[in-house]
Amino acid sequence: MRTSIQVGTLIGIPIRLHFTFLFILVGIIGGFATLPATEYRVPLGLGGIPMSPFVRYSLATAAAVLFFFTLLLHEMSHSYVAMKFGTKIHSITLFFFGGLAMMEDLPKSPREEWRIAIAGPLMSFALGGLFLLTSWLLKLATLIFGVPASVLRPVTILVFSLGFLNVGLGVFNLVPAFPLDGGRVFRAFLATRMPFLKATKRAVLVGKIFAVVMAVGGFLADPITFFLRGEVVSGNFWFPLLAVFLFIAATEEENATATFAALEGVKVRDVMRTERTSVPEGATVAEVAKKMLEERTVEFAVVSEGGELRGFVTWEDIKKVRPEQHLTALDVVARAERGGGAAFESVEEFVFAEEAAAVALKKMMKSRRKVLAVRDAVSGEFVGIITRRDLSDYIEMLR
Ligand SMILES: [Zn+2]
């Protein structure tokens, strides 16, 4: 399922918006338009300031768009430093709780990791400082030049809010709870004195404890109201929800790190399958299904009579075909190709038998494929297939 759309590219990095980001955007516009300007220790929105709804929501929308760019700049600065270290950035996705820069490699050294991690919060602090400074200058201008307060005050408030949000974002991200930026700095610190996997497990454990504390604490009392008004009021579901998200993200990253650590030194050749690999392109869907059942496998390469690779068929694709359609394996490949089906494997997507198994896994994760062709590095010939299931079984057995 496609849950995000690409909205553009910046210095060669695809920028994507996750559908959940739309909720937060609407929420932020609403917040800027209605949160009180005077009730709290700091002004947060335009609530209570007399103005027409049109002006109110236009200003709020402009501020929300600016906030979007500050989030983007936070992620861009992670990406920029990563690229300096030679790590490719797959994409930047903005979603519900912020952004995520997807890197194609695990950090190569602790020094690299902490620098990449710290760049984001530093950018948030710099932007926050800039906004705060601007809001004070605007205030000053109002006083010096006698501009009527009604003209500049709404803008001053929104600029201040943006500054406040960015500083808050920077502070929150520095909490040493994995997978927050501070947690990555923490892991890098640990990794200088123990193996990377062990450092990850420790950092993840601290991250999970933090998430549990945040969930329970946030449910019992609202930390934001406490900060803004010094009052203890009962909490809501926002912090618990964020905590659940952090907990899941921490677990996922721990698993991914464990997987890649387990695959260290393992070659594609060790995991690949050389039997039960292919069906002829002319085989009917019924024949393919029968062969899958007999050989207890859910994916096959489709090869021509000359042994050339045409693509792949998976059980998922076969299921979508009705028997009266009389399709062949090659038809299924073509259909999947046209419809962007899960099974279609561009013939270009392959790995060499002598490559690291981790390379195959990365390629599969990046392209969301379940199977890759394996070629011989010298002859270029199709020698087998490697599937996600083979990889996970292999890792399971190693453990
Ligand atoms: Zn960050």
Image (tube, grey):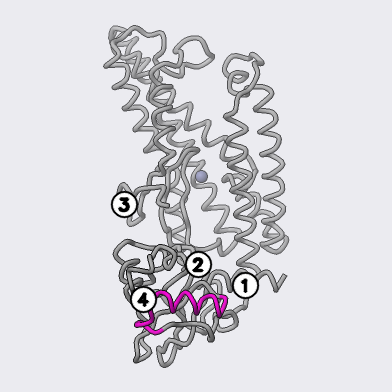
Q: Could you tell me residue 140's position as x and y percent?
A: 36, 15
Name the kind of residue labelled 2 in the image.
Lys
Give whichever of discs 2 and 3 has the lower sequence position: 3
Residue annotated with mark 1: 263
Q: Does the magenta stretch include residue 287?
A: yes
Element carrying mark 4: loop
Quickly name the residue at label 4. Answer: 348
Measure the alpha-carbon separation of dots 2 and 3: 22 Å
Q: How many labels does the image show?
A: 4
Residue highlighted by disc 3 = 9
Residue pictured at 31% horizontal, 67% vertical: 335
Instruction: Please provide percent x and percent y for residue 161.
Output: 44, 23
| Main SS class of the magenta portion in the image | helix
> Looking at the rendered structure, which numbered label has been put on residue 362?
2
Q: Could you give the CA–CA distance between mark 3 and mark 4, rounded to whole angstroms?
A: 24 Å
Rounded to the nearest whole Å, what is the CA distance between mark 3 and mark 1? 33 Å
Query: Which stretch did the figure color magenta?
Result: 280-296
